[in-house]
Amino acid sequence: MMTSTESTDKSGACPWAKSSCTTPVTSPWVKASVNAPAPCSLEEVMSEQLALEAAAAAPDNFQSDAELAARLAAAEAVGDPNDEAIARYLQREFDKEYDAMVDQVERKYNGTSKVSISFENYKMKHQREAAGVECDEDDDDDYDAEFPEFPTATNWETVAPQMGQRGYAGQGKNIVTKHDKVICGRRNAERLMEVW
């Protein structure tokens, strides 16, 4: 059952709808219709500024294809004597980036281990020559005093104590067990050398 006031309200505009209302709405959920311009997006503003800058920077006189081709041919005929220097510079910069990448891989590969692997042979040749490292192919045949072909005897080859059936040798404070780190290290190294 509708009353006459409800029927008039429903026949008119809904107070929360976006249609135009003749009376101002005081509800906080309804926006008052104001004839304001739609906001522009940042992309539209930036593209408009770019178009204005391009129009200002564009030359007023456009050259025909023939004029442009003649101008390019003249520039190529003269040539730049510094092309080789520029190419060498760019190659050097590329090599530096590559060497930095190799160094990074080397650091990651070695980590915090005590034994490290050098990736020096993977670096660019002219960089190593500039650093004073010679890159001869006959390096393997040269005599190297630091690393002789037949090494001299070291304390590594000292005789290890003979262990009994119980796994230790000595008495008192001079007991050496089969788990001694020096003895185990020697034994592991000997096994590794036999494999090689």
Image: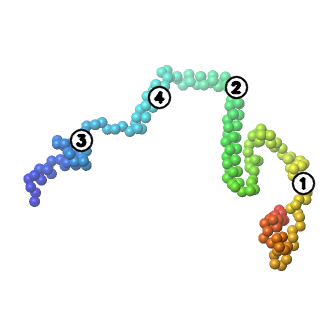
Amino acid beneath label 4 = Ala
x and y, in percent, of residue 104 in the image: 67, 48
Residue located beneath label 2 in the image: 81
**What is the quadrant of the C terminus in the image?**
bottom right
Residue located beneath label 3 in the image: 33
Residue extending farthest top? 61
In space, the residues marked 2 and 1 are separated at their CA atoms by 51 Å
Q: Which color scheme did the rendering employ for the protein?
A: rainbow
Residue located beneath label 1 in the image: 149
Residue at 86 percent of width and 62 percent of height: 156
* In the rendered image, the vertical position of residue 162 relative to residue 86, given as above or below: below
Amino acid beneath label 2 = Pro
Residue at 78 percent of width and 66 percent of height: 181
In space, the residues marked 2 and 4 are separated at their CA atoms by 33 Å
Q: Earlier in the sequence, mark 4 or mark 3?
A: 3
* In the rendered image, the vertical position of residue 94 relative to residue 110, given as above or below: above
Q: Earlier in the sequence, mark 2 or mark 1?
A: 2
Q: In the figure, residue 134 lies in which quadrant?
A: top right
Q: Earlier in the sequence, mark 2 or mark 4?
A: 4
Residue 54's label in the rendered image is 4
How would you rate the neighbour count of disc 2 (Cα within 10 Å): few for under 14, some for 14-19, many for 20 or more? Answer: few
x and y, in percent, of residue 175 in the image: 82, 72
In space, the residues marked 3 and 1 are separated at their CA atoms by 95 Å
How would you rate the neighbour count of disc 3 (Cα within 10 Å): few for under 14, some for 14-19, many for 20 or more? Answer: few
In space, the residues marked 2 and 3 are separated at their CA atoms by 70 Å
In space, the residues marked 1 and 4 are separated at their CA atoms by 72 Å
Q: In the figure, residue 152 lies in which quadrant?
A: bottom right
Q: In the figure, residue 172 lies in which quadrant?
A: bottom right
